[in-house]
Image (cartoon, rainbow, N blue to C red):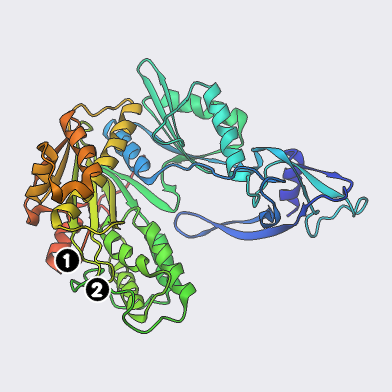
Amino acid sequence: MTDEYNALIDNKTLELVPRPSGINIIRSMWIFAHKENSDGSFARHKARLVGNGKTQHVGVDCGEMFSSVVKPITIHTVLSLALSKAWPIHQLNVKNVFLHGDLKETIYMHQPLGLRDPKHPHHVCLLKKSLYGLKKSPRACYTRFVDYVLTIGFTHIRSDNSVFIYRRRSSLAYILLYVDDIILTASFDVLRQSIMTMLSSEFAMKDLGPLSYFLGIAVTRHSDGLFLSQQKYAAEIIERAGMSSCKSTSTPVVTKPKLSATAGVPYEDLIRYRSLAGALQYLTFTRPNITYAIQQVCLFMHDPKIEHMNVLKRIIRYIQGTLDYGLHLYPSSTSTLVSYTDADWGGCPDTRRSTSGYCMFHGNNLVSWSAKRQSTLSRSSAEAEYRGVANVVLESCWLHNLLLELHCPIQKATLVYCDNISVIYLSGNPVQHQHTKHIEMDIHFVREKVACGQVRICHVLSRYQYIFTMGLPSVLFEDFRDSLSVRRPPAMTASVC
């Protein structure tokens, strides 16, 4: 606690001043934690002083709070690029990142418990810089970081505001920012070291070496590529659910019709259901094969039934049997973008809305996937499929722009595969009739991309389709999982990135 408070004083984060009258004064609290290594072993004790931002008032001592973080698809794409180009990938951490942000608002805080100044017991702390717990802290530290990296030659990209690019002739470097965690990759190791030196001169940086553990994801470099795993996080979910000794299942969801929101007896422990379902969503970062199953249980957050909880438990039982599985990335061509999309027409028993899903490959690497219930009712299977195509075309256009800004453009048209012939005819022929008036916007959007040569809609047989819209039998599911590059860790000895 003393070390933390002295660090705040040395960093000029706060100063003691006489207590003003008629001013909102927030409280503070201490957060104690055990810091762990990537393997779960104990590293050190940590005490952090946190401001109680709940008592701040927007427009008085708090302004705009939104702060950008890097998108998962961007992380997958940059890792795929760096791996294919054999670039070094390093991980950095900004020490006490929230203490670097400058505050524009005037904020007063009570002195921390246990460390009240005996000479000025009635003084309060005037915050000069951001502090953990304040509503504005994430935005303030993000702004400070952005302002500095722009001065050393980096530029923002419009596709993702948390990605910064440095380019000088043949030299190229990327910075990916997620609050205080940073991924840095560069075309030359000398350039990477130079950037790290410049960042360390401005911020209290910690070089964590080659990328190995980022946002709870273990990254292992082997002779064939990268292996991304959330085994530790998955084990924590299983333990939280009290199912450490449960039997495993071969699939995360059964093949019977989708669940209803009204059938069954209400589940009493709403907090437990919502907590487990929310935790499972982050597991899809490296486990795209369970995306559909988790999407289904998340539909009933507002009023879960016992049957919904049983489905959630089945997902956990499946994770128990595949605890060491993860996503593989391999060196591959970076000149192609291929997508697969499918829709389950009217599958929801309550609303009769369709579920659409897609996956997108950059070269041979899976970088984006989704399973989502459509927001409107579809009057035909062609309409449901076309809405799914429109969604994946929109995502592919965004990824196309991202790669263009990363100076790795896709010169070929993006291939979008679906198993509905009507969709292919509608996307390429300027025909408009009464059965397609209600999806006119989607039709014109896709046709425009097809006409300009940016997208090609192709047919694929259903047995070769990637299914993100329904449960699959064991044999088909295992093929589906393997085609997504979700497999066991490599048997060979791991090396650093």
For the point 44% across and 69% down, the residue is 274
Q: How many marks?
A: 2
- In the orientation shown, which residue stands out farthest toward the right? 119
Toward the viewer: 203 or 3? 203
Q: Quadrant of residue 265?
A: bottom left
Judge whether 474 appears above or below 376 on screen.
below
For the point 64% across and 38% down, the residue is 101
Mark 1 sits on what residue? 472
Judge whether 456 appears above or below 1 on screen.
above
Q: Position of residue 49 (x, y in %)?
A: 70, 53
Q: Position of residue 13 (x, y in %)?
A: 73, 41
Quarter of the image with the N terminus is bottom right
Q: Quadrant of residue 449?
A: top left
For the point 14% across and 49% down, the residue is 434
Judge whether 50 appears above or below 408 on screen.
below
Toward the viewer: 296 or 322? 296
| Residue type highlighted by circle 1 | Leu
**6 relative to 139 in the view: left or right:** right
The earlier-in-sequence mark between 1 and 2 is 2
User: Label 1: few (<14), some or many (≥20) within 10 Å?
Assistant: some
**366 relative to 301 in the view: left or right:** left
Distance Cα–Cα, label 1 vs label 2: 13 Å
Q: Is residue 496 visible?
A: no
Q: Quadrant of residue 136?
A: top right
| Residue type highlighted by circle 2 | Thr
Find numbered disc 2 in the image and state the secondary structure of the residue it sits on.
loop
Disc number lying in front (1 or 2): 1
Mark 2 sits on what residue? 249
Find numbered disc 1 in the image and state the secondary structure of the residue it sits on.
loop
- In the orientation shown, which residue stands out farthest toward the top? 169
Q: Position of residue 41 (x, y in %)?
A: 50, 60
Q: Is residue 426 visible?
A: yes
